[in-house]
Image: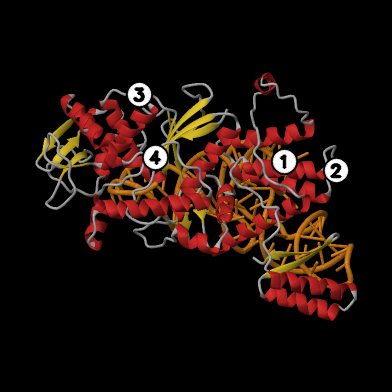
RNA sequence: GGCGGCGUGGCCGAGUGGCUUAGGCAAGGGCCUGCAAAGCCCUGUACAGCGGUUCGAUUCCGCUCGCCGCCUCCA
């Protein structure tokens, strides 16, 4: 089974699903106040790869990811643009899903919205107030973090050092620097819901607790998100679950950032590229490959150079698929062979292929070591291109490589290109010239094709055109 | 100030106490090709610096320098 680094335990531990054969996964989703950038893209791809991998292993993944559609930034944006918060949220959410679709990211099995859960959040806050974990001030309701014994577990800091580190003090009515807001009273003109503490809106940290527990139930398997959510967001979710006496996530997973010149990509630094910008000029699969070539817990440089290098590597994979006429298809990675055989699957898989699959699975199971897994796949590509020396045919090896990639959501493209009639004609004329040994003319025609974006490839069976990168 | 992490060959990016010179991209040399493209083969002796532990350290420990993240909204 898959092992993952668990932030709470501080080490890589095996995922032992609450329910055998199923994994309940909660991924903190976007706040839709603006368009998604490359960092969001990496995030989505990391979890998409994990989900697809688990599914390829025959595990059902209940994947819940929220959409935060009410918060300060959305309010601010709406005010700036003189629009309603729901207009801002809906528009950005549409952009989000469009980008996810382009990236080939599977939709979550459920994508709850914060605004749909305000009633349940109010109930939860009331419980926390009743239990003495929360208190009301003139600005709203706060959670008393010091009431939770192991507060700071995810932050890896003691309560004392967290208090010492607190740099920003916004609300003097808080009892402790580490307390966080559960309910914000509305200022005039702000969107608001009625509550026992006056009309207002929930604080950010409450929605994920309420929604994850509602949809995935107590003790769900994995809770994940970016490193920046580790503290305070996830810490505060844990604290509320504790106050509500609800068993919470059994495993905490955090991924590292996309960086530009060594610095975290973020809206506030202004060093971001929107996903839409990238997808306009690069194959979405190139970003997926780039993400796969790094480990999810390491920072990743996404630049013009690294994306284009990934694009060239991708072309190598596509070339292999073209060479062997491969159409990618799914892969059953069910690792437990006896279970496999019980299902009546007696397909003869050679020992050679089995060992390649086992090695891939071993690497992936080790905290999603996609760089190693991809490296192994490129080795298969070379083996296939060389003509295979083992008992398996080169095309079987190539097919395996394509299938393993497909299990990570990367689909090679071995199909021909749509060639416009003008270019097709040039190619035809070049073939005639070559046959007539008029290489000067042939080369001139090839240059013409090159200038209009095509690379000519002469194969034993005839010439083909490929888009230039 | 508190806590955490990182510094690998031209670039990206893995990994390990002594055989992986991971892998990708780029570069150079070959093979193939009419020439190319694609592909294959070969090449570069990298692990911030200084000490220490060890038979042996890029990998373990300490220190120094540099960089970054979280502590505030954030994937």
Q: Earlier in the sequence, mark 4 or mark 3?
A: 4
- Label 1 secondary element: helix
Compared across the picture, whether A281 is left or right of A420 comes to: left
Chain on which label 1 sits: A
Alpha carbon separation for disc pair 3 and 1: 41 Å
Q: Earlier in the sequence, mark 2 or mark 3?
A: 3
Badge 4 marks a residue whose secondary structure is: loop
Label 2 CA crowd tier, 10 Å (few <14, some 14–19, many 20+)? few
**In this orientation, does residue A174 appear?**
no
Horizontal arrangement in the rendering, residue A458 relative to residue A221 (left or right): right
Specify whether A353 is left or right of A69.
right
Q: Which marked residue is nearer to the observer: mark 1 or mark 4? A: 4
Kindly check if marks 3 and 1 are in contact, taking CB atoms under 8 A apart as contact: no
Q: Which mark is residue A400?
A: 1
Secondary structure type for disc 3: loop
**Same subunit: marks 1 and 2:** yes
- Does mark 2 fall on the same chain as mark 4? yes
Q: Residue at x 87, y 79 (%)?
A: A438
Provide residue B64's location: percent of width, then percent of height.
Answer: 44, 54
Foreground of the two, A398 or A152: A398
Mark nearer the viewer, 3 or 1: 1
Q: Quadrant of the C terminus of chain A?
A: bottom right
Q: Chain of mark 3?
A: A
Q: Quadrant of residue A343?
A: top right
- Which residue, given by chain and number where applicable, does mark 2 sit on? A389
Q: Quadrant of the N terminus of chain A?
A: top right
Q: Which residue is mark 4?
A: A111
Compared to A287, does A206 lie above or below? Answer: above
Query: Share a chain, discs 4 and 3?
Result: yes
Give above or below for A260 relative to A59: below
């Amino acid at each position: 089974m898959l092992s993952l680094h668990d932030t709470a335990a501080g080490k890589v531990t095996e995922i032992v699903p609450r329910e055998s054969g199923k994994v309940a996964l909660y991924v903190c989703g976007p706040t839709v106040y603006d368009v998604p950038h490359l960092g969001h893209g990496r995030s989505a791809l990391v979890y998409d790869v994990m989900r697809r991998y688990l599914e390829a292993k025959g595990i059902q993944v209940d994947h819940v990811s929220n959409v935060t559609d009410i918060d300060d930034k959305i309010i601010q944006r709406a005010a700036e643009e003189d629009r309603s918060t729901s207009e801002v949220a809906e528009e950005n959410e549409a952009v989000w899903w469009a980008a996810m679709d382009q990236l080939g990211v599977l939709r979550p099995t459920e994508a709850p919205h914060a605004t749909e859960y305000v009633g349940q959040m109010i109930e939860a806050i009331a419980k926390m107030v009743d239990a003495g974990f929360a208190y009301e001030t003139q600005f709203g309701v706060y959670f008393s973090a010091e009431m939770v014994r192991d507060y700071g577990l995810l932050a890896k800091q003691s309560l004392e050092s967290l208090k010492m580190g607190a740099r920003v003090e916004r609300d003097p009515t808080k009892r402790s620097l580490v307390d966080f807001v559960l309910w914000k009273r509305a200022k005039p003109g702000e969107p608001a819901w009625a509550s026992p503490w006056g009309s207002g809106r929930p604080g950010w940290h409450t929605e994920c607790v309420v929604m994850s527990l509602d949809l995935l139930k107590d003790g769900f398997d994995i809770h994940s998100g970016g490193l920046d959510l580790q503290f305070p967001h996830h810490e505060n979710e844990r604290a509320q679950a504790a106050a509500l006496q609800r068993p919470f996530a059994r495993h905490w997973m955090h991924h590292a950032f996309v960086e530009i010149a060594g610095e975290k990509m973020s809206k506030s630094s202004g060093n971001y590229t929107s996903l839409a910008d990238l997808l306009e000029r690069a194959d979405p699969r190139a970003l997926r490959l780039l993400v796969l070539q790094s480990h999810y817990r390491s920072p990743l440089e996404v630049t013009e150079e690294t994306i284009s290098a990934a694009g060239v590597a991708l072309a190598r994979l596509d070339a292999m698929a073209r060479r062997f006429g491969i159409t990618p298809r799914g892969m059953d990675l069910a690792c437990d062979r006896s279970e496999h055989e019980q299902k009546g699957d007696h397909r003869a898989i050679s020992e050679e292929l089995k060992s390649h699959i086992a090695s891939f699975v071993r690497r992936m199971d080790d905290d999603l070591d996609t760089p190693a897994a991809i490296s192994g796949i490129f080795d298969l590509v070379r083996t296939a291109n060389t003509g295979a020396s083992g008992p398996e045919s080169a095309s079987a090896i190539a097919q395996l490589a394509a299938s393993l990639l497909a299990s990570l959501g990367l689909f090679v493209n071995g199909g021909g290109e749509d060639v416009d009639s003008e270019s097709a004609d040039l190619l035809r004329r070049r073939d005639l010239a070559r046959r007539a040994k008029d290489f000067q003319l042939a080369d001139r025609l090839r240059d013409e094709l090159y200038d209009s974006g095509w690379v000519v490839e002469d194969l034993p069976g005839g010439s083909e055109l490929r888009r230039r990168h």
